[in-house]
Amino acid sequence: QVQLVESGGGLVQPGGSLRLSCAASGSIFSVDAMGWYRQAPGKERDLVASISGGGDTNYADSVKGRFTISRDSAKNTVYLQMNSLKPEDTAVYYCDAIIRNQYLIKGDYWGQGTQVTVSS
């Protein structure tokens, strides 16, 4: 069984920073692309940033220049460094990963979500 566990959310003032972490564990053969999505109240879940197995990154226009996604493949962990946070960044942030399990079956796995609130 594979699971993703997120950490690092919380309350921060506008202009502040947070770092989210997401660790994949369980019966993992390999981890391909990983990413972060967010969902604000009453809105759809949208992609924030993604990183391929080879390290190529992709960002939503709204976070370019402020957020940085990275991964530690040895630890099956993905990070999201969020700087210059704005109130509109407030949302539940979800980790997503494409993982092959011990039987080489590829699946799309999601974390439980972590709340990020940007407010003074």
Image: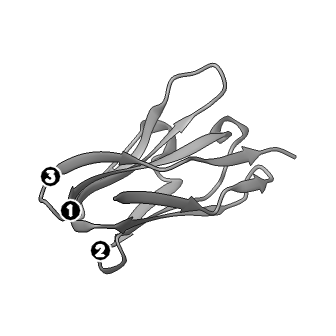
Residue 53, disc: 1
Q: Viewer-proximal residue, 49 or 7?
A: 7
Q: Nearer the viewer, mark 2 or mark 3?
A: 3
Q: Is residue 95 in view from this perspective?
A: yes
Percent position of residue 51, x then y: 30, 56
* Residue under the point 44% across and 58% down: 4
Residue 75, disc: none
Percent position of residue 103, x then y: 13, 60
Does residue 44 lie above or below 38 as drawn? above
Does residue 13 lie above or below 70 as drawn? above
First along the sequence among labels 2 and 3: 2
Picture quarter containing residue 17?
Answer: bottom right
First along the sequence among labels 3 and 1: 1
Picture quarter containing residue 77?
Answer: bottom left
Residue 73, disc: 2
* Residue under the point 48% across and 53% down: 65
Q: Nearer the viewer, mark 3 or mark 1?
A: 3
Q: Viewer-proximal residue, 55 or 43?
A: 43
Q: Which part of the image, by quadrant, shows the N terminus?
A: bottom left
The reply to whether discs 1 and 2 touch (Cβ–Cβ < 8 Å) is: yes
